[in-house]
Image (spheres, rainbow, N blue to C red):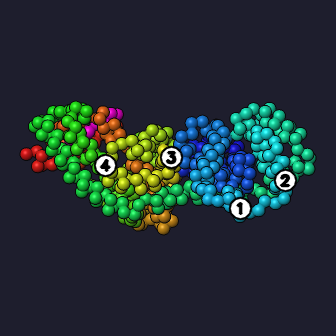
Amino acid sequence: MAETDEELVQRARAGDHEAFGALVDRYRDMVYGLGYHLAGDFEAARDLAQETFVRAYMGLGSLREPDRLSAWLRGIAENVYRAQVRRKEVSTVVLDEQATKAPARDRIPSAIELTVREALDRLRPPERLTLTLHYINGYSHAEIGAFLGVRSDTVKTRLARARQSLREELLQMAEDMFHDHPLPPEFRQDVIGAVTRLVEGFRAKLPDNVRQLRDTIRSDGDRKLSVARSALVVLLGPLPSEEGEIRQVLVADLPADVRQQLRDSLCYVWVDWVLMQICDSVPWIPDPDGLWIRFYKAGGKFCLRLTSAPGKYAPTHNLVIDADDPEAQPAEEPEAQQTGEVLAGSSLPEELRRMFEPLRQAVPGKPGALRPAFYAEMAGLMREVQNSLPAEAKAKMASGEGVGAASLPEPLRQLLKKALAFHWGFCVLHAVENVPGWVTDFEDSKVEFGLFPSDARVEVPVGKPYVKVYGPDGERSVLYMTIPDSDED
């Protein structure tokens, strides 16, 4: 029995390319037919169909009703078409009369195609689209109705009206034309290939001088941060001397000059953190063979531990890759927090704005949809690595030991490298597009002085003084800053 859309969607969300490929095969002609209806050209329809499925893969994590997948695909295809039209309008500059002519196509439509297209254009759009979907793959009334969001009886009526409007020979010509211009057999592979190139394209768009930018940001930021912390210490009096003793102040209650110093320093802290994610979020990305891995189960979830050395105290990175668990799926970020909007309406220092703009431009239009896609790719590839491990490696992991990536067979090392690249893309997108509350709503934030408690989640000595900045959303947006020894005296 064939799997339902919902079952295939759940598998595809976990990075299963076969499941997503099955969905592509199931709806490819439906989307292709809509593309032809909108663009009136088979090559343009093929391009539209491929972009639609790539965007669909990116957005699977946000699909709330998998049983309405076909209607969801229709909406994506229509949005893709509108975006393509807008891009053409923006890129078209009329220089003279010659420039107003339609651009030449690589493929010249045949006389039959022109005749059929002219006949179809005389139909009302709903009838033309219904007829196109019927002839392009022989879809049933129910399937077409689900795609268009109408009842089967409505589809039947539209088909009848379309047939009444066209002569019998034109109907046969239309059927033959669609039969002669199918999507190529490799369409499914083309879509999957486009998905796997997403992270590579994203990496290529990032500026080459990220590390130099970070060095500049860190140097200037440390200086500004030291000035701001010193001003706060002078303003608020002696630092707390006992664990548990804290002192808080609203940013809005600080003098204007101290507020400005603090805001500038926090902006530098934020941009430095973003650049750190790009450069160092996964330190073994440049050298995957220096990585040690161990797959394990925790709380019923499938997890992976990554370390840069086999020792007990080596830097460790833990990943939950059980993407079948809804809680493991990264949530789509709200559109209101897009970095572009934040930068446009903020008082980010000009030098930081110039440095940050190339990073923002590298981020796709809807990173909230791309992030779950990267996560699903990582999870699927890691499962493939785990399933293909040699028996000796599995036994070591079961006993609690890690396995060096360099000891794995070459095909597994390549899978691991690709998975880490998707994880890196996920981390960078999260950093670039998630602006902390103490940057976006600085005036409504709060500053706290205290001593690091014994359960602090940061690597500092217990009892060391700190400055803690809360965004308006409380604990979800917190920045810890240690106070230099020179400020403690």
* Mark sitting earlier along the chain (1/4): 1
Q: CA distance from mark 4 to mark 3?
A: 26 Å
Residue, disc 2: 115
Q: CA distance from mark 1 to mark 2?
A: 18 Å
* Mark sitting earlier along the chain (2/4): 2
| Residue 401 vertical position relative to residue 134 in the rendered view, above or below | below
Q: Residue at x 48, y 68 (%)?
A: 410
* Mark sitting earlier along the chain (3/1): 1
Do we see residue 21 in this rendering?
A: no
The residue stretch that appears in magenta: 467-474
Give the percent coordinates (x, y) of residue 109: 78, 59
Q: Marks 3 and 2: which is nearer the front?
A: 2
Cβ–Cβ under 8 Å for marks 3 and 2: no
Q: In the image shown, does 261 or 211 lie closer to the viewer?
A: 261
Residue, disc 3: 366
Residue, disc 1: 105
Amino acid under label 1? Arg
Q: Residue at x 63, y 49 (%)?
A: 85
Amino acid under label 2? Thr
201 relative to 346 in the view: left or right: right
Identify the main secondary structure in magenta. Answer: strand
Do we see residue 120 in this rendering?
A: yes
313 relative to 336 in the view: left or right: left
Give the percent coordinates (x, y) of residue 380: 52, 52
